[in-house]
């Protein structure tokens, strides 16, 4: 007999004489002549109510069906007389597959998130984390769908890299050398030529430069893979290992890039609103009461666009007292970003053309800037509650200007010979952006700590499971 | 004016007065009164033939349109009188965006694959590598589609791991310690407690154990992420960094696992046959003449199943002289696997129930084995040309038997406390398998070297780009 998932059983069009359910006991309530068991199999938030009649030959097994036990039920799917569910199952056979005794840590409700992180191997069996990881899966799929539907090609950027100069953050070293006693050269320094890749290697901080290579061949591409930061910051928004999406588009300028980013964010929100409705309902009840309002705000409001220079003027005229002072040339902080989107414009905002000095070497210089006010074609997409959710730029496609940018940032041209080659041979205007997957997941679930949207989070001092 | 991709222009339903094409010059041929340019934008294998009439004001620019240059063309899409294409574009405006001079390495045909690896930043602009990376993207998407359509949830297994005892292969160390002068404890040994994660960490070799955690909560899950082997083997089939797919299914036995693996392989082949027809045609012409025959062989033939013990008997009775001797208890080698699928059964074969001693600790012990012939519920799916393409098993869900397996393999229970917990609390029969993404890609493209199906391959001594 074929297993039926609870999700499908709950959506059944009509009753059924015999279905097979398999899953785990969430709760059990014993009455005089029968027991009610909530069976959850992770296919959806809701469990199926299973009724085991005391006259059933298998009824004695029910006593072993504690919270957390795995069970198998064959029964009739019938309309429920109880409240809160359309269907329930009246068991004809009932079997406990694997017991769970009183030491099972998830039996009682009201555990702290901190405690649940310590049992990350069991927390996906809870309502909250089941919902988080179902949404995580759906969001990842929606990302692929968005790009594949638009003719983008998926590129796997390398994880291990010998580039250590991108300046995006601290990097992890990858090595097979014996740390106790590494080989050393005549100068007594560790001899990296004897390492696995015959040079120093690290974990990647971004796949953008490699994505540019592929955009300059296949036109429209995106990466979606793990990236790393060896930063010793213990905040609710930073992890050492996280996933990032980086589309890159040939023959595209900064405004085309904004169009793509805005369409992308709306598509993702619309997709999870539709496909994860019950899970999002749960988050809006128990995690963040404003969640659905905020998601609909982004879905329904038009995005405004505002140059960095205009944004600074707005912030200066706001009459607000800022923790971080505002002045042309300084980076916008979360408080500024949130003011722009939540209070001033009251809609999502894309800020563009940032000061050259605070941005990366590969961003395209804006033509015709006033002296002392040089900008580059960078953009940040701001949403309420978070501030920046996407950052992108048009890349510098002019060889001489790129070289000037590299000199300004003290980068060695030799390490970027292939990146420069892209500007030597058939160079094209191109642009792209980066979205931190977990940041987007926190936005659509309302979950406040990045550790709680990653299956097994890696943070300073923590690499369990 | 909106850009039209060459792929869409070639599939146009009718002519058009004005379309905008952007891409790179593959070839140019000058006649007396006009020039023919093949414009490729990577959206598909074929380029669009663009005709620039010598009377056009922009015609002088054509002289700069060398192979590799980027160009922009507005023109009329008209029926082609030439052979080999339905549509061509008669230019009304013509512009060179980025030139490519005589040093552009891809102008002449007939470069070796070895040379093209050295210019991995340009090779995606060639026919072969454009096709490889389009198929790579489509295959990845088909993998997600297959599982998502079946209610599987995508899980991101951690890349950085503190488990070093899985025994699947040599591991890369991940560290932020200063290799020149690492902190040392009182025993003079390197003090790993001062490393970023406060212990020794490595790059993962498999996400299976973590996938089991999620299968025991969400029922049906799969991973799809990078995995690593620090093995110093310079073969055409090994890379230090590759992507792997690992589905895991709760309430599933070995035969359910085989059903899934067989359906999966057929689905992927059918998908790329349909969506990458032109690219596969190219491979079958220029890379591997047998390719389409072999793919259809797997699509059309029923899969047979054969126990390891039966397989050994067949091999012993074959009358063949084997390079690696056959006897019960020894691993099957590629020559044996290929004989079974190509010569004996003449169809794809799933071999199952392998000797316990040569398989991993987590595989489920078969009940009722003859003494000295203990087996575990492992299976390998064999296809022609390659041999094993998928390996999987039912996992040991019985706590006592799992402990015995760990003792047999000299594993420390303490390191696996959470893995054992899965058997303590609501344990269920479950099974899964692993598919090397690049191995499947080699199978569907016929490309013989793994370095040529990875954007930027990492192999001993090589981590360029």
Image: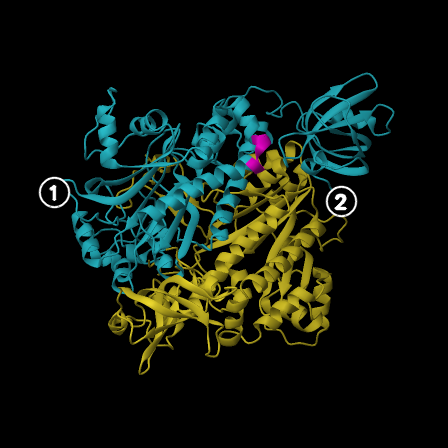
Chain colours: A yellow, B cyan
Q: Residues within 10 Å of mark 1 (few under 14, many from 20)?
A: few
Along the viewing direction, whichever of A120 and B11 lies nearer the viewer: B11
Along the viewing direction, whichever of B379 and A134 lies nearer the viewer: B379
Q: Chain of mark 1?
A: B
- Residue B83 position within the rendered picture, expressed as x and y whole percent measured from the top left: 72, 21
Q: Residue extending furthest top?
A: B32
Q: Residue at x 47, y 28 (%)?
A: B446
Q: Which mark is residue B371?
A: 1
- Residue B296 position within the rendered picture, expressed as x and y whole percent measured from the top left: 48, 31
- Residue B361 position within the rendered picture, expressed as x and y whole percent measured from the top left: 23, 48
Asked whether residue B171 is drawn in magenta, I would say: no
User: Which residue in the protein does label 2 denote?
Assistant: B2
Compared with residue B463, is residue A304 higher up or lower down, i.e. above or below?
Answer: below
- Residue A7 position within the rendered picture, expressed as x and y whole percent measured from the top left: 47, 63
The residue segment tinted magenta is B274-279
Q: Chain of mark 2?
A: B
Q: Residue at x 70, y 47 (%)?
A: A253
- Indicate left or right for B46 with A138 as reference: right
Image quadrant assignment for residue B236: top left
Image quadrant assignment for residue B61: top right
Establish whether labels 1 and 2 are both on one chain: yes
Q: Secondary structure at mark 1?
A: loop
Of marks 1 and 2, which one's residue comes earlier in the chain?
Answer: 2
Compared with residue A85, is residue B241 higher up or lower down, i.e. above or below?
Answer: above
- Indicate left or right for B251 with A288 as reference: left
Q: Residue at x 32, y 26 (%)?
A: B344
Spatial CA distance of label 1 from label 2 is 72 Å
Residue A102 in view of the camera: no
């Amino acid at each position: 007999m074929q297993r039926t998932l609870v999700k499908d059983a709950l959506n059944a069009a009509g009753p059924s004489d015999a279905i097979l359910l398999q899953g785990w006991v969430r709760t059990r309530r014993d009455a005089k002549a029968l027991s009610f068991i909530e069976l959850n199999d992770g296919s959806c938030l809701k469990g199926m109510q299973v009724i085991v009649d005391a006259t059933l030959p298998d009824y004695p097994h029910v006593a072993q069906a504690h919270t957390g036990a795995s069970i198998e039920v064959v029964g009739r799917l019938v309309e429920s007389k109880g409240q809160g569910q359309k269907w329930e199952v009246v068991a004809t056979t009932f079997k406990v597959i694997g017991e769970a005794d009183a030491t099972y840590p998830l039996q009682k409700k009201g555990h702290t998130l901190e405690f649940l992180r310590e049992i990350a191997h069991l927390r996906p069996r809870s309502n909250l984390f089941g919902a988080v990881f179902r949404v995580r899966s759906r969001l990842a799929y929606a990302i692929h769908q968005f790009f594949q539907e638009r003719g983008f090609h998926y590129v796997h950027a390398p994880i291990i890299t010998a580039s250590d100069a991108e300046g995006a953050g601290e990097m992890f070293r990858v090595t097979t050398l014996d740390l106790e006693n590494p080989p050393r050269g005549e100068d007594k320094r560790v001899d990296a030529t004897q390492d696995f890749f015959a040079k120093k290697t690290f974990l990647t901080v971004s796949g953008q430069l490699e994505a540019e290579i592929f955009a300059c061949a296949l036109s429209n591409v995106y990466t979606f893979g793990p990236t790393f930061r060896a930063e010793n910051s213990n905040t609710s928004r930073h992890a050492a290992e996280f996933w990032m999406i980086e589309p890159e588009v040939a023959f595209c300028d900064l405004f085309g890039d904004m169009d793509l980013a805005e369409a992308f964010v709306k598509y993702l929100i619309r997709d999870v609103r539709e496909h994860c409705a019950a899970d999002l309902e749960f988050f809006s009840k128990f995690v963040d009461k404003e969640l659905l309002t905020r998601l609909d705000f982004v879905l329904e409001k038009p995005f405004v666009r505002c140059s960095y220079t205009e944004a600074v003027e707005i912030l200066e005229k706001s009459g607000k007292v800022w923790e971080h002072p505002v002045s042309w040339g300084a980076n916008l902080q979360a408080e500024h970003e949130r003011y722009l989107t939540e209070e001033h414009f009251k809609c999502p905002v894309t800020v563009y053309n940032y000061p050259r000095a605070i941005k990366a070497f590969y961003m395209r210089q804006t033509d015709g800037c006033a002296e002392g006010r040089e900008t580059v074609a960078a953009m940040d997409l701001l949403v309420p509650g978070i501030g920046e959710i996407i950052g992108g730029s048009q890349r510098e496609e002019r060889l001489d200007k790129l070289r000037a940018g590299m000199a300004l940032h003290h980068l060695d041209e030799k390490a970027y010979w292939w990146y420069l080659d892209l500007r030597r041979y058939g160079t094209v205007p191109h642009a792209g952006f980066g979205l931190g997957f977990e940041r987007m997941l926190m936005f659509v679930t309302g979950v406040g700590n990045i550790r709680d949207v990653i299956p097994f989070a890696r943070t300073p001092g923590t690499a369990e499971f």
